[in-house]
Each structure stands twice: as structure tokens, then as C-alpha cells.
């Protein structure tokens, strides 16, 4: 990391543990983090310096902005990042938190702390590990040291998270393509505190748990709310962050949260939160998913594949999205395409380590009886035994080309391209959301010529595949999976009732909390 050479650089600790937890998914383990990213100390600084890095993009943005505008010294603590999954193993979480605490204590004194978390993590024992982490950091560094946090807009925000941080900055785009500027924004807020600014945070939480497919920021109710929020960032209001949250965490902190941070008096932040919260609640009926049935989706695919005048389409298997904790292995769409006689479609990423091992053992150019989900106990996944030809096998290492993975080092694990009755299936071993065209292209597939593509992704594929498919070519399919947007299919035990849209009679009385600035 290149530094500006001055006498007294600002020492800023860097840490984060990024996991979006789906309570219904299998436990996220130490091994899951080691497969993706888990770095401490000098290894972290070395990763920040790479042209293609595995570190969270917002941390890269923070570091780049600080280097360009501040005489600073990064103090690497520990970062971990993993695909969305089940609750993190509590013992591993405690080990990580202890390691962070020890490294922070050894690094004192510090001038600031930057935390890059997702914000919707739960453990196998507690529901607010993010808040606990922020509190640990605050206990170590004290009240006078700025603690600035960036979070995914799907974070579930607790009072404790807001109370312990000086400012929380959320992503503003969905698909998430603005992480680098959000990291830079966090750096700017930290500098503002160093220069004497007084930050106040206003916060409101609504009993609105919006289905994931209703939360795009270029259209729909959340797009309207996002644009309204941007208009409030002026004058003394330095930041407005919208957090519609992540329903499948099933916590008592679920519910759309709106935060505003003002410089100086708290009044401007309070007014902004109040106005935006009322707009969100008044628009609540617009947060209803509109999905296409499996049968109708298969029929559309057949017509596109057989009628040249029809435009190509991309099917989003939104309920089996690994980016929301889905297992990435349901066969429902594949079965419907096969039964309808659709040929020439591309499908990925199908997470099935046993299937990939079988394909590798078989060898390229040879055929075998493929057993999809042979080792899975998930009833919704559906075992499928069918003849397949191995077209290619790879180690799965690549660099993202577009969208949320652009420029990021990715590892899909050993990966195989199979021809399954005329449908090209990309199967892999490290569960990953299919949000980047490189996952097909690395296997020699030409997306520009594809008529039908199926991706196991909720929405992030839109920013990756938009050079091939416009919004009008996207079909969101109502299939099975752990993150179906139809929330009435789940038994929520911890979200405060009533909440909309599961409870039609849910009500809300405007209430804005204020968290005063810390004394420096």
C-alpha cells in the first residue's frame, strides 16, 4: 500500500466479517470462509495492493480514497468474506471476534476504525453478531476514536449497531455496483470527524419486510425511494442510507430501516428520515412480487428457442439464489425445460460437488449417467438421473468481468460443463451466485448467441448480463428454494408481528430515534 509521506500518518484499523445469513440454510463454517476469504495482518495489506483482489470492494474504495486524500497508515486487523449461507458457527465467530479484539488491542493507539460488514449475519446462538462486533470495537478503542461502517443495503439494522458506530453507510444500488464509492464515502466521513465535524444519526425501522425481487434501485417502489433519498443528501445531511433488510435472517431487527447522518444539528437528519419513512410505508402495497410459474417459463423458453423472431430471454431462479443462502441445486427449472423439449439453453451455476467429481472422473468428451443431487438430503432440490456428456472441466479460478464481481478474484472450485439432453449445465463445487457472464464464457460458451439462459441468481445477474439481456428480457421464475420471494411460504419465528406483506393489517406509527454525536 503506497502512503503519502508525512510525519504523523493517521492510523486506521481495517476489519470486517461479511456474511448474509439465511436461517434456513446449513451452518456457515470456518471452512466456508477459508474457501473464499479469511485474512489477517500483513496478508490483508498485500491483498489490498493487488490489481485483482479478493477483498471487499468497499474496503478497496476506502483505502484508495484515504491514500489519495489523507496521510494515513492502514492497520490490518482481520477480514472474512463468504457467499450468503446459514448462521455462522458460533464457536468460529467467537474465535474470530477474539482475534479481532486481540489485534485491535495490540494496535493501539488508533485514529480510526473502518468496518466492512454485510450487516445481516446471525450465528448459531445469537441474532446480532454485527452489533456485538461494533460494541467490542468501541470498548477497545474508546468513545473518542471514529468508527465508520459500511453495510450491504440488505442489512438488518439493530439499535445497537447504530449506537456503537459514528456513521453507517449503506450501498445505494441493487444490483450492488457502488461499493467502491461507498467505501470512499466512509473515508470522507472519517476525515470530517478528524476535522471537527459533529455527526448525528437519525434512525427509523418500519414493519415492512420487502421481498427481495421488489428491491431493484432502477425501477419500482424501492427505486423511487432511493432517488428520493439521494435528493436529501445536501446541506448538513451528509448521508442517507436505506436498508430494506433480509427477510430470511428472521430476527427481531428485521424491517426496512432508514438512517440519515447530519453534520452539526440533528434536525435535518430527523426530517429526512421522517419524510422517507412515510413514503416507504405509503408505498407498501407496491412491494409485492410478480413471478412467472415454472410451466409458463418453460413455455416461453420453448417459443424463444423455436421461433427466431422472439427475443432471447434470461430466467432468474430467484428462490434458489446462492447469493441469498439458496443451495444452488434445485432441478425444477431444468426438469420443466426438459419436459417441454427445450434444447440449446444454458444453465448455471449448479452447485453439486459429487456431480463435478463424477464428471472429472469420466473425462472430457465422454458420457455417463449423471446423478444430480445424489448426495443431497434437501427434498426441494430433487434428484435427477440422466445421461450427460462432459464437454469441459476447469479448476474454476477466474476474475469477474462485469457487475458485482467485476475485477474480483473468484474461485468456483472445480467446474464442469455438461451437455444434459441438449441443455448446457455449468456445475461447480464452491457455491456461488451466477452473476457474471465469465462463469459461462470461461467454458467457451457464447452468450451473444444464446437464446435461453438460466441463472441461479436473484438480481445481481442483471448488472453482469445486461450487455446481452435488457430488463424486458428477464423472467423471474416462481420455483422452490430457501429464498423464495413469496414470504408466506415460510414460518417466521422472530420477526416482530405484524409485518407487511405477510400481515395485511400491519400498522405503523412514525417514530424517529436520534443517536447523538460522541464527545471527542
Image (tube, rainbow, N blue to C red):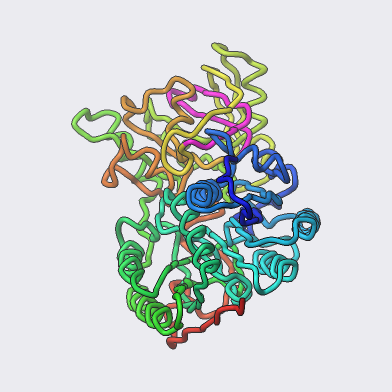
Name the residue located 45 percent from the left edge and 83 percent from the top edge. 265
Decide: is 179 above or below 49: below
So how many labels did they put on this image?
0
Asked whether, in this view, residue 251 is left or right of residue 246, the answer is right
Residue 440 locus on image (x, y percent): 45, 28
Residue shown at the point (63%, 46%) measured from the top left: 82
Q: Main secondary structure of the magenta part?
A: strand
**In the image, is residue 208 above or below residue 338?**
below
Residue 332: percent from the left, percent from the top?
49, 42
Quadrant in the picture for residue 15: bottom right
Residue 96: x, y in percent? 76, 54
Please state if 168 lies on the left or on the right of 337 as rendered: right
Residue 259 drawn above or below residue 32: below
Residue 493 appears in the rendering: no
Say which of 380 and 498 sits in front.
498
Whole-percent x, y for residue 467 in the image:
31, 36
Magenta region includes residue 76: no
Looking at the image, can residue 447 be seen? yes
286 or 55: nearer the eye? 55
Q: Quadrant of residue 463?
A: top left
Residue numbers of the magenta segment: 407-430
- Above-or-below relation of 74 to 197: above
Query: Foreground: 368 or 312?
Result: 312
Residue 411 inside the magenta-drawn segment = yes
Amino acid at each position: 500500500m503506497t502512503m503519502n509521506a508525512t510525519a504523523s500518518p493517521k492510523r486506521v484499523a481495517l476489519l470486517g466479517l461479511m456474511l448474509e445469513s439465511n436461517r434456513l440454510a446449513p451452518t456457515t463454517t470456518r471452512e466456508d470462509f477459508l474457501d473464499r476469504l479469511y485474512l489477517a495482518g500483513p496478508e490483508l495489506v498485500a491483498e489490498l495492493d493487488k490489481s485483482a483482489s479478493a477483498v471487499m470492494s468497499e474496503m478497496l474504495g476506502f483505502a484508495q480514497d484515504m491514500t489519495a486524500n489523507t496521510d494515513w497508515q492502514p492497520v490490518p486487523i482481520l477480514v472474512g468474506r463468504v457467499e450468503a449461507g446459514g448462521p455462522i458457527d458460533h464457536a468460529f465467530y467467537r474465535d474470530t471476534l477474539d482475534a479481532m479484539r486481540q489485534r485491535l488491542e495490540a494496535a493501539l493507539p488508533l485514529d480510526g476504525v473502518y468496518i466492512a460488514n454485510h450487516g445481516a449475519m446471525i450465528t448459531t446462538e445469537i441474532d446480532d453478531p454485527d452489533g456485538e462486533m461494533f460494541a467490542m470495537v468501541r470498548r477497545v478503542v474508546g468513545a473518542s476514536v471514529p468508527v465508520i461502517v459500511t453495510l450491504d443495503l440488505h442489512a438488518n439494522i439493530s439499535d445497537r449497531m447504530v449506537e456503537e458506530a459514528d456513521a453507517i453507510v449503506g450501498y445505494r444500488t441493487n444490483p450492488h455496483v457502488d461499493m467502491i464509492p461507498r467505501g470512499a464515502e466512509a473515508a470522507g466521513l472519517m476525515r470530517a470527524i478528524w476535522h471537527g465535524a459533529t455527526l448525528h444519526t437519525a434512525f427509523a425501522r418500519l414493519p415492512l419486510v420487502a421481498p427481495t425481487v421488489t428491491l431493484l434501485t432502477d425501477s419500482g417502489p424501492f427505486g423511487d425511494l432511493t432517488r428520493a433519498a439521494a435528493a436529501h443528501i445536501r446541506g448538513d445531511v451528509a448521508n442517507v442510507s436505506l436498508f430494506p433488510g433480509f427477510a430470511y435472517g428472521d430476527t427481531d431487527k428485521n424491517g426496512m430501516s432508514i438512517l440519515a447522518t447530519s453534520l452539526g444539528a440533528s434536525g435535518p437528519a430527523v426530517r429526512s428520515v421522517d419524510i422517507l419513512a412515510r413514503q416507504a410505508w405509503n408505498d407498501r402495497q407496491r412491494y409485492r412480487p410478480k413471478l412467472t410459474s415454472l410451466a409458463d417459463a418453460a413455455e416461453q423458453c420453448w417459443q424463444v428457442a423455436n421461433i427466431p423472431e422472439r427475443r432471447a430471454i434470461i430466467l432468474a431462479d430467484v428462490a434458489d439464489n446462492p447469493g441469498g443462502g439458496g443451495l444452488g441445486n434445485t432441478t425444477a427449472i431444468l426438469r420443466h425445460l426438459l419436459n417441454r423439449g427445450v434444447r440449446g439453453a444454458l444453465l448455471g451455476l449448479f452447485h453439486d460437488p459429487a456431480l463435478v467429481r463424477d464428471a472429472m472422473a469420466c473425462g472430457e468428451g465422454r458420457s455417463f449417467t449423471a446423478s444430480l443431487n445424489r448426495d443431497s438430503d434437501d427434498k426441494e432440490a430433487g434428484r435427477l438421473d440422466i445421461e450427460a456428456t462432459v464437454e469441459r472441466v476447469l479448476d474454476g479460478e477466474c476474475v469477474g468481468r462485469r457487475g458485482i464481481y467485476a475485477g474480483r478474484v473468484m474461485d468456483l472450485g472445480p467446474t464442469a460443463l455438461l451437455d444434459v439432453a441438449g441443455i448446457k449445465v455449468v456445475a461447480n463445487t464452491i457455491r456461488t451466485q451466477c452473476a457474471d457472464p465469465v462463469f459461462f464464457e470461461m467454458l467457451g460458451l457464447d452468450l451473444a448467441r444464446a437464446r435461453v439462459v438460466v441463472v441461479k441468481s436473484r438480481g445481481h445477474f442483471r448488472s453482469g448480463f445486461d450487455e446481452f439481456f435488457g430488463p424486458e428480457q428477464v423472467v423471474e421464475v416462481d420455483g422452490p428454494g430457501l429464498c423464495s420471494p413469496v414470504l408466506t411460504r415460510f414460518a417466521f419465528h422472530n420477526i416482530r408481528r405484524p409485518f407487511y406483506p405477510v400481515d395485511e393489517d400491519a400498522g405503523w406509527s412514525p417514530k424517529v430515534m436520534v443517536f447523538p454525536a460522541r464527545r471527542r
